[in-house]
Amino acid sequence: MPPEKIEIFKSMKDWAEKNLLVHLKPVENCWQPQDFLPDAASDGFEEQVRELGVRAREIPDDYFISLVGSMITEEALPTYQTKLNPMDGLRDETASSLTPWAIWIKAWTAEENRHGDLLNKYLYLSGRVDMKQIEKMIQYLIGAGMDSQTENNAYLTFIYTSFQERVTSISHGSTGRLAKAHGDMKLAQICSTIASDEKRYEAAYTKIMDKLFVIDPDGAVLALADMMRKRITMPSHLMYDGCDDSIYSHLSAVVQRLGVYTAKDYADVLEFLVGRWKVKNLTGLSAEGRRAQDCVCCLVPKIRMLEEKASERAKEAPTIPFSWIYDRQVKL
């Protein structure tokens, strides 16, 4: 970012301390994965594990494909912290900085870490998936990193995280509703609890952009238009399982078919954020800013048209094997 943009974030330190850190929870007030899993210290541990497995047997394979995708995305957390730490205006060069931005990044990472831990342990105990294959997937993904196309620009990054946290809240919520429909109330509780956390993080990141749209509307709308032109991709888009070069697109097709996260949801998220940040009502913009404003405000109808075409193509989708479930076949 240019120096004047970096100065904006430095000037927001007091604001961040008052408005951002309130979205964190003290460790002692946080749920932990063990709260939702069989208690290894109890006499009934083995029976609890058997009951979990019995419930899991009633859930279709395509659901587990979606759940594994969610878990792998959560497990790539080291990449996300690595992406945020060196950001211009937020930089934590020692990994022990006490600026509000650095405190947020570390504590947010610590809270998020519970999501992958919980889903990983649940999947292991379910007995429905090939955990060694999934563990290789996680290693591949962390090794590959991610390309969010946000460069080293905090404006672009907070557009991305605002969008992404809303998406993950939607997808975990949808996954929870499907678990409930399949009769696994404990898994439904797990997914809805994670979704609630993601909603809280969404509130924090959108609040940062609320502030930027007030103090620098031109810079904020240009960043929003830039990210929308690039099209926001999921953080796990570089995933690989060692054999399927198109595993991410295959996962996306299953998730779309199940209704966990769809092209319609993408359009809905953009529509929500454009409304939240009052993009249509921005004034005092440069000529470039006005063009960006027009571009963003016209995008939602175009995306909805593409969603309709994608839904038609999905009806003719093939069935393929997934290594995560011992190469059993799943319709895309």
Image (cartoon, grey):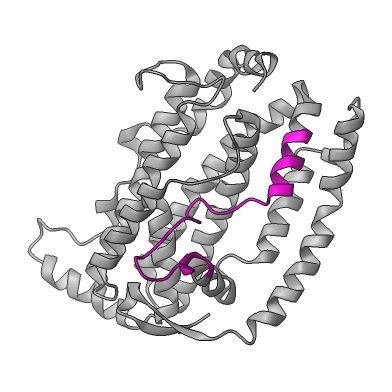
- Residue at 18% across / 75% down in the picture? 50
Residues 309 and 66: in front is 309
Q: Is residue 246 magenta?
A: yes
Viewer can see residue 124? yes
Where, quadrant-wise, is the N terminus in this rendering? top right
Vertical order, 168 against 244 (above or below): above
Vertical order, 94 against 272 (above or below): above
- Residue at 79% across / 27% down in the picture? 217
Residues 246 and 259: in front is 246
Please give left or right for residue 124 compared with residue 242 in the image.
left
- Residue at 85% across / 46% down in the picture? 295
Residue 159 found in image quarter: top right
Please give left or right for residue 190 compared with residue 305 in the image.
left
Residue 330 found in image quarter: bottom left
Image coordinates for residue 305, horizontal then vertical, percent: 80, 68
Please give left or right for residue 162 compared with residue 113 in the image.
right
Image coordinates for residue 39, horizontal then vertical, percent: 17, 58
Residues 310 and 301: in front is 310
Image coordinates for residue 101, horizontal then vertical, percent: 50, 23
- Residue at 75% across / 75% down in the picture? 309
Q: Is residue 245 magenta?
A: yes
Magenta span: 221-249
Residue 120 found in image quarter: bottom left
Image coordinates for residue 317, horizontal then vertical, percent: 59, 84
Total marks drawn? 0
Viewer can see residue 25? no
